[in-house]
């Protein structure tokens, strides 16, 4: 019963991770390549609005005379920069015309404001705000998953509030009735992994060797937070071992807030009521491990385009089951796998099965999303059975180390598993993936 509740919670997660992007190819010659974002943003808790200024450093071939960025329903006040001629907003797209120039590198400054309808969620009592996906609805950006960039995030919050955000906290400055939190992420990730949360949070922390683990909530006590997240240290070590890559920040934060789930760079948001489930059954930690797994598979090893989205989500889903096997035993692992298989079989009964590599990822259905998560995780289980556990995990480590910090397509994963094992896996991938 509890396990089925976990699956239902993951279903609710899927609703907020559908990604309605058009599934463009990865960065090609002449495409926009953002190097860094430097954002200053101030949410207004009473109006549900934001004001922002983002400095975008990018490179693009000088023969290209315009760039496009995503800006949701934001109102653009001005765009300035040495190469900027003019700008216009069409729907949710910001088009910036560029002058003739000789170099690839450019810098523009965009001032904007707005009342985001999605991507940023305000809560009035108690007063808090947090981001979930749809970064372009609160920050002008290039939202292709293949375009990874460094981030500086300057957040202006009411005095007395705590702040959690992507990257590492560099400085806190008190200014009259406001507080400026300065965060910096010195490694590249796609824009959808950026985010923050502001509120009057309870907090507790623990040290995991070189990593400070922080837990936040509006309503759980520090003691309850310690109990809910007590396996985080084990999870961190497990994913480091399976990937062959140490966690790359000095902090990892988790916050129980609102009605959503999302992995972000350096922290995760988890639905507030999820904490109660873990307090009732300490083995129901799938969503904690799922979001943490994304710090490797998703945030740093990222699908090049959304049609290969299973490389993000199936991996995180499968890794949560693999951790359960390590922590709670084989029966718990098989219970997870059987739950994933049941979801997949129900989809097949409705004749909605599709390859894991989608033709495109435009307006995906609930079944499409469930295929990416649950069929994908089940297929990774089958691949492990096909290869044997030792060869499978050797391949996962080889793949993870080879593509860490890069964008990938399914063929990259297939070839890495083949190269590591010396096996030809074409028949398996043709049957289950393509």
Image: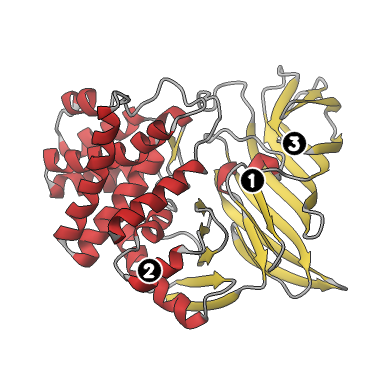
Q: Position of residue 432 (x, y in %)?
A: 23, 28
Q: Position of residue 187 (x, y in %)?
A: 55, 51
Pointer 2 or 3: first along the chain: 3
Residue that label 3 marks: 73
CA gap, disc 2 to disc 3? 37 Å
Residue that label 2 marks: 278
Pointer 2 local density, CA inside 10 Å: few below 14, some 14–19, many at least 20: many
Q: Evaluate whether residue 104 shows in this view.
A: no
Pointer 1 local density, CA inside 10 Å: few below 14, some 14–19, many at least 20: some
Q: Residue at x 27, y 59 (%)?
A: 1
Q: How is the image coloured?
A: secondary structure
Q: Quadrant of residue 140?
A: top right
Left or right? Give the position of 202 relative to 379.
right
Mark 2 or mark 3, which is nearer to you? 2
Q: Secondary structure at mark 1?
A: loop
Left or right? Give the position of 403 relative to 180.
left
Left or right? Give the position of 158 relative to 351.
right
CA gap, disc 3 to disc 1? 11 Å
Pointer 2 or 1: first along the chain: 1
Tell me, yes or no, whether the two marked residues, 3 and 1, touch with CB atoms within 8 Å.
no
Residue that label 1 marks: 119
- Of all residues, the one furthest to the bottom in this rendering is 223
Q: Quadrant of the C terminus?
A: top left
């Amino acid at each position: 019963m509890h396990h089925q509740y976990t699956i239902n919670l993951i279903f609710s997660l899927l609703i907020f991770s559908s990604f309605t992007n058009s599934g463009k190819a990865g960065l090609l010659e002449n495409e926009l390549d953002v190097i860094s974002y430097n954002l200053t943003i101030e949410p207004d808790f009473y109006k549900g609005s934001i004001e922002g200024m983002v400095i975008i450093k990018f490179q693009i071939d000088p023969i290209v005379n315009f760039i496009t960025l995503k800006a949701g329903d934001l109102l653009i006040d001005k765009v300035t920069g040495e190469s900027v001629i003019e700008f216009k907003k069409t729907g949710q797209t910001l088009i910036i015309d560029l002058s003739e120039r000789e170099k690839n590198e450019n810098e523009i400054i965009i001032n904007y404001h707005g009342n985001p309808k999605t991507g940023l969620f305000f809560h009035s009592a108690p007063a808090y705000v947090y981001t979930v996906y749809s970064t372009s609805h609160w920050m002008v950006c290039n939202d292709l998953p293949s375009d990874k960039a460094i981030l500086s995030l300057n957040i202006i919050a009411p005095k007395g509030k705590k702040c959690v955000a992507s990257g590492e906290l560099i400085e806190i400055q008190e200014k009259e009735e406001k507080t400026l939190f300065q965060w910096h992420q010195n490694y590249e990730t796609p824009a959808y992994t950026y985010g923050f949360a502001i509120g009057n949070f309870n907090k507790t922390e623990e040290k995991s060797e070189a990593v400070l683990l922080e837990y936040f909530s509006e309503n759980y006590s520090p003691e309850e937070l310690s109990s809910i997240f007590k396996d985080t240290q084990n999870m961190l070590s497990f994913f480091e071992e399976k990937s062959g890559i140490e966690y790359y920040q000095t902090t990892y934060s988790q916050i129980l807030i609102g009605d959503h789930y999302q992995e972000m760079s350096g922290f995760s948001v988890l639905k507030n009521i999820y904490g109660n489930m873990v307090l009732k059954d300490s083995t129901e930690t799938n969503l904690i491990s799922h979001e943490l797994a994304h710090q490797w598979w998703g945030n740093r090893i990222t699908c090049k385009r959304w049609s290969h989205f299973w490389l993000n989500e199936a991996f995180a889903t499968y890794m949560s089951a693999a951790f359960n096997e390590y922590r709670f035993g084989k029966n718990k692992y098989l219970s997870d796998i059987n739950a994933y298989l049941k979801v997949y079989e129900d989809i097949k009964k409705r004749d909605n099965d599709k390859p894991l590599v989608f033709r495109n990822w435009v307006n995906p259905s609930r079944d499409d999303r469930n295929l990416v998560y649950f069929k994908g995780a089940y297929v990774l289980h089958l691949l492990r059975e096909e290869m044997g556990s030792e060869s499978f995990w050797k391949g996962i480590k080889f793949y993870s180390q080879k593509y860490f910090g890069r964008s990938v397509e399914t063929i990259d994963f297939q070839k890495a598993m083949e190269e590591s094992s010396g096996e030809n896996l074409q028949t398996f991938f043709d049957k289950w993936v393509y």
